[in-house]
Image (spheres, rainbow, N blue to C red):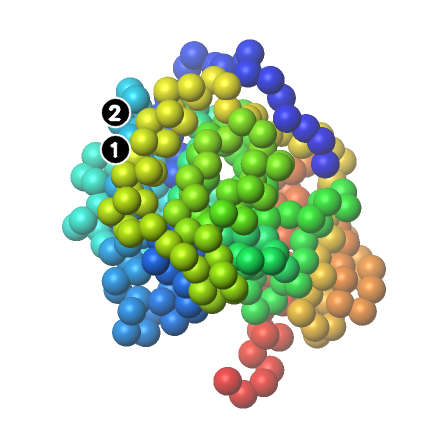
Amino acid sequence: MSALEGAGDHIAERNGVFISVDMEGMAGIVHLHQVMRGMPEYERSCRLMTAETNAAITGARRAGADRIVVNDSHGDMRNFLLDELDDGVEVISGADKPFSMGAGLDSTFEVAFFVGYHASVGSERAVMDHTYGGRTIYAVRINGRPQSEATLNAALAGSFGVRTALITGDRTTVEEAARDLPGIEGVVVKEALGRQAARSFHPVEACRRIEQSAHAAYSRRDSRPLYRPSGPFTLEIDWMNASMADLSVQIPQVQRAGGRTVRYETGDFKTCYQMMLAMLVMATPAAYQYPR
């Protein structure tokens, strides 16, 4: 995968911020039970998610952003406490939507923010690391390069000409993004001690830092990375088990590349992204073959 492009091609007609919000990367969140609907701590996590999103919105707005669209990108994607969310934004909710975590992205935005993100699957010292499918995906590569949700969504943004300006989460998440997206504004809200343990800032302090960095991210938006990989693209997914590969190769043009590995080739990144989501839908039933 290539390719970070320079800062000289800002389009004057673009306006505003697209914010994709996950939950695992929020300050104070360390365990799967905190991010699962129906668990006792889940609603508190929704409140933390809403507060950190509001902080990013406030920072962007102070820097001059007057149009903000927020996409709920965690789990079933119905997690915001809407009556506590800033009333000046548009909200995209629900899981069955085009481009999933990138739903709503188009060429009218100036920048994208990724709030509450987590590191890629298999990362060391990262809270609840995974890439898109925690029960299904063992690894994702494009042109041989391992992917995180941040790189996948930054590349999707870049395919619309939208720069990725901000990421928040644990230290590993932020450092991982900075390697692939040099120039991105990063906010470390916690440091993982293990996959389900972390040393975290107080939520109020985390929100203060996010607001400050969102202000900086939007203020200097033309210098933020436009991550626009060049094709053609070879997508490879290593599934958790071979049954998932069995199911996903039923999609035309998806090829078997190993016992649990599949491959798909295309010249268009949006198509590559959509195929990853389609294969995930096909493979997911095989995650529930064993009693839970």
From the viewer's side, name the closer residue of 243 and 241.
Answer: 241
Question: Considering the numbered disc 1 on the image, is that residue within a helix, a strand or a loop?
Answer: helix
Amino acid carrying label 1: it is Thr
Give the residue at x 82% y 64%: 258
Q: Give the numbered dot on residue 58.
A: 1
Q: Position of residue 79 (x, y in %)?
A: 31, 57
Residue 91 in view (yes/no): no
Label 1 to label 2, Cα distance in Å?
6 Å
Question: Closer to the camera, 224 or 263?
Answer: 224
- Badge number at residue 68: none
| Residue drawn at 34 percent across, 58 percent down | 28
Report if the CB atoms under discs 1 and 2 are less than 8 Å apart: yes
Using residue 5 as the reference point, say whether residue 41 is left or right of it: left
**Rendering coords of residue 239 (x, y %):** 68, 65
10, above or below 288, in the image: above
Name the residue tied to disc 2. Answer: 62
* Above or below for 95 versus 36: above
Task: Assess disc 1: are there few (<14), some (14-19) or many (≥20) residues with their C-alpha within 10 Å of its C-alpha.
Answer: some
| Towards the viewer: 39 or 260 | 39
Identify the element where label 2 is drawn: helix
Q: Quadrant of residue 66?
A: top left
Q: Residue sitting at 62 percent across and 75 percent down?
A: 286
Tell whether 270 sits left or right of 259: left
